Image: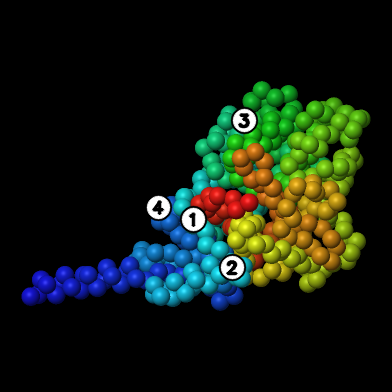
Amino acid sequence: MRYTLHLFFAFLLVFHARSTQIMIPMDDGQTDHLKAYGVAYYCLENNITIEWLLNYRGGSFLLPHLRTLEEELVARNIRYEILADGQVNQIRSLIANPEENMEVVQLEKAPKIAVYTPKGKQPWDDAVTLVLNYAEIPYDEIYDSAIVMGVLPKYDWLHLHHEDFTGQYGKFYSAYRSYPWYKEQVAQAEADAEMLGFNKVSELKRAVASNIKNFVVGGGFLFTMCSGTDSFDIALAAMETDVCESMFDGDPSDPRAQDKLKYENAFAFENFKLERDPMVYEYSNIDGTDIHRSSRLTEATDKFTLFEFSAKWDIVPTMLTQCHTDVIDGFMGQTTDFRKDLVKPNVLVMGENKSIGTARYIHGELGQGTWTFYGGHDPEDYEHKVGDPPTDLSLHPNSPGYRLILNNILFPAAKKKKRKT
């Protein structure tokens, strides 16, 4: 009899576990939005399929009710709810309603992540690295030598640290050429170029940019912020010319460099004009930082707005714009945002600064892969300056600006659906 009772209680425990699920709400009531993405990734790492409820309570996650997952949620101070099957079915019915702008997406496989970043990250820290560490999402750090030697096919997702792919060392020459970190950066870059068989750093960076483009064409997911956006596109357009002055590469730039740009090679931008003056802290007129300054926007008034997409038809941009608010505090960078008239017509604008008419968050496809460009340097440091300490994300666990980064991390994990059109 006792043995039978033990079996009965064991059956009840199993039945209870199977008849309930965990939901991580991602609305305003969530205690830590950023770490919630880390738990989602943790599930995928452990071969646990989960569901992303697009536009339902801020883009909530639905997980199996497993004790290990509940323990993780408690340990990471993430708000969650235990739902019975009936409650889950009600949510599914709501989402399935054609009148509701919602959808369910299965997340199946943890993407293998690489961050393209120099050792030490001088002179900048990096928002993506900060949030990956905070959310406890694993990644590999790689740099020029690894990319030139063909390591990218090992990865699904690549982020480009605040970077200058034009070979002009971030155009820090005017303000920082006497600083030790600048001299060390130049010396290391020149040594790396020589070791890898390139005559100049600009030639190495062009080769790196070309390899990254091939990675995307072959099915990779690329994400980059700040100067990793426009400098990358400029490098692709300038493959057949020299845009660097002598202080950067030892010889003058091509006087016809502007005319030799091939915009068709770039991902996002066209018809832009290079900033040829080496003493100006800018690559081209793609960047909208000067518009921000001339418009006298302040930290309190600088905002950008996410577009709303059809969750049932435009699943990709819907995933990338999941957030608990559609109005997000702006933040500056070497490249703050993008002039709309220079964005290619086939590029999808997902977020814009309506007050000044600039694009902040853009996305596109190339070959079998996709890319996302996000303007600005640090979503929780309005005007991050050289020497400023890194942002402490434990003070910003619900940051909408950082959520957009993590949407891109989970995007490659989505089960591919057949196109509806």
User: Could you tell which of marks 4 and 2 lies nearer the N-terminus?
Assistant: 4
4 vs 3, front mark: 4
Residue matched to label 3: 148
Please say if 135 is above or below 263. below
**Mark 3 Cα shell of 10 Å, populated few (<14), some (14-19), many (≥20):** some
Does residue 94 appear in this view? yes
Residue at 43% from the left image edge and 56% from the top image edge:
49
Task: Estimate the x, y position of residue 183 in percent, counting from the top left.
Answer: 74, 39
Of mark 2 and mark 3, the one earlier in the sequence is: 2
Amino acid carrying label 2: it is Pro
Question: First in sequence: mark 1 or mark 2?
Answer: 2
- Where disc 3 sits, the SS reads helix
Label 1 belongs to which residue?
107
Q: Nearer the viewer, mark 1 or mark 3?
A: 1
Residue 331 in sight from this viewpoint: no
Give the residue type at disc 3: Val
Tell me what residue is drawn at x 83 percent, y 30 percent.
242
- Residue under numbered circle 2: 98
Disc assigned to residue 47: 4
- Residue placed most toward the observer, 361 or 123: 361
* Quadrant of the rendered image containing residue 350: bottom right
Q: From the viewer's perspective, tell me whether residue 248 is left or right of residue 387.
A: right
Residue 401, x across and y down, in percent: 66, 63
